[in-house]
Every structure is written in C-alpha cells, then in structure tokens.
Image: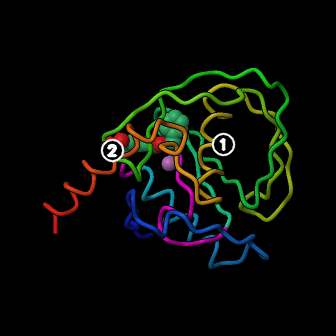
Amino acid sequence: MARLSILEFPDPRLRKVAEPVNEVDSRIKTLIDDMFETMYAAPGIGLAATQVDVHERVIVMDISDNQQAPRVFINPTVVILDETLGEYDEGCLSVPGFYETVNRPTRIAVTALNKEGETFTEELQGLMAICLQHEIDHLEGKLFVDYLSPLKRQRIRGKLEKAHRQRA
Ligand code: QAP
Ligand code: CO
C-alpha cells in the first residue's frame, strides 16, 4: 500500500471531471487500497480519486471511529429521496484547516459498484448522505467552497496560497 499526495485548493486539477470506471480490475483495487491508506493517515472520513489526481469515478469513505466501516463507491449515481436540506459544517482534505456550513439533502439512494465490481443500491441518511454528495462533487470537479460566498472562498484561497508559498 502507498500513501498518495492530496491536491489542495486552488489546484486546477481538482476541477477535472472524472471518467467512469470500465472494469474493477487490479489497478482499481490497488487505487482503492492506497486511497484508504491516504484517508486513514490524514485522518479523514471521505476521499475521492480526483483528490489524489486520478480522474476516475472512485470514492472511499469511513465515518466510523476506528476504521471499522470502510465503504467503496465506484461510478455512483444518487437519487434524492427527500428535498429537505440539512446543514453540516463540512471540511475537506483538499481544503485543510477550513470548515464551513453547507446545506444538502440528507436522505438519498445511491447506486454504485462495490470493490468486487458488483452493483448495489442503498439508502443513506445523515453524515453518510452528506459525505457521499461531497465526494461525488469532487468527481464533477466541484468543491464545498463553491457553495460559499465569493468573499469567503477568496479568503480561503488566499490563505491556502500563502501556506503553499511558505512550504515551497
Ligand atoms: C468530507 O472530509 C466531509 O481541514 C471528508 O485539516 C467532511 O475527511 C464531508 C480533514 C465533513 C462532510 C462533512 C479536514 C482533515 C478531513 C481538514 C474530510 C484537516 C484535516 C476532511
Ligand atoms: Co473533499
């Protein structure tokens, strides 16, 4: 397994739209293992392949405390079951150090492929539903900061650019 490096806002590669996975082969399985290692090390609760500069529709998630509930979603599609929005203070491994309130539907059904390449459909609610929608946004080149006011987004961008300059 390998720890992958995570792209950070405003890296333009985070804006690429990911391609569907054709076959869940050994290359995709290795990618999934490496994404879990990267997410757990961070630590984080969700990671999309886009964030590690792989532009294919793969998401890993684990909202449990002790790495007890690893979940994989390949080529996910979502149906909103209830248009009622819930608010949540979202963060992102690609926007380190910043948390802001975002509103999203909290009851969805997802259809995706699992790590074995089998199709499944499942209803999700609460943090699982929010996190999955956040991760699917990554596959579309979208970030949670896009839901904020331009002023807030610009402030976050400026601070992260400064941090990147100091690291370089
Ligand atoms: C997405 O985010 C998410 O700023 C997953 O310094 C988060 O795992 C969806 C993290 C919350 C919905 C609600 C963030 C780690 C991890 C940071 C993450 C940081 C270190 C974020
Ligand atoms: Co994110």
Is-magenta flag for residue 45?
A: yes
**Which amino acid type corresponds to the residue marked 1 in the rendered image?**
Gln
| Whether residue 152 is situated above or below residue 52 in the rendered picture | above
Residue at (76%, 54%) from the top-left corner?
A: 76
Instruction: Give the image location of residue 30, x and y in percent.
Output: 57, 72
Q: How is the image coloured?
A: rainbow
**Which amino acid type corresponds to the residue marked 2 in the rendered image?**
Ile
Q: Which residue is mark 1?
A: 133
Looking at the rendered image, the disc whose residue lies closer to the viewer, 1 or 2, is 2
Q: Can residue 77 be seen from the camera position used here?
A: yes
| Whether residue 129 is situated above or below residue 85 in the rendered picture | below
Residue span colored magenta:
41-56
Instruction: Give the image location of residue 146, x and y in percent.
Output: 52, 45
| Whether residue 88 is situated above or below residue 133 in the rendered picture | above
| Whether residue 32 is situated above or below residue 59 in the rendered picture | below
Kindly identify which numbered label has been placed on residue 156: 2
Quarter of the figure that contains the N terminus? bottom left
Residue at (65%, 70%) from the top-left corner?
A: 56
Q: CA distance from mark 1 to mark 2?
A: 21 Å
State the SS at label 2: helix
Kindly identify which numbered label has been placed on residue 60: none
- As drawn, is 148 to the left or to the right of 18? left
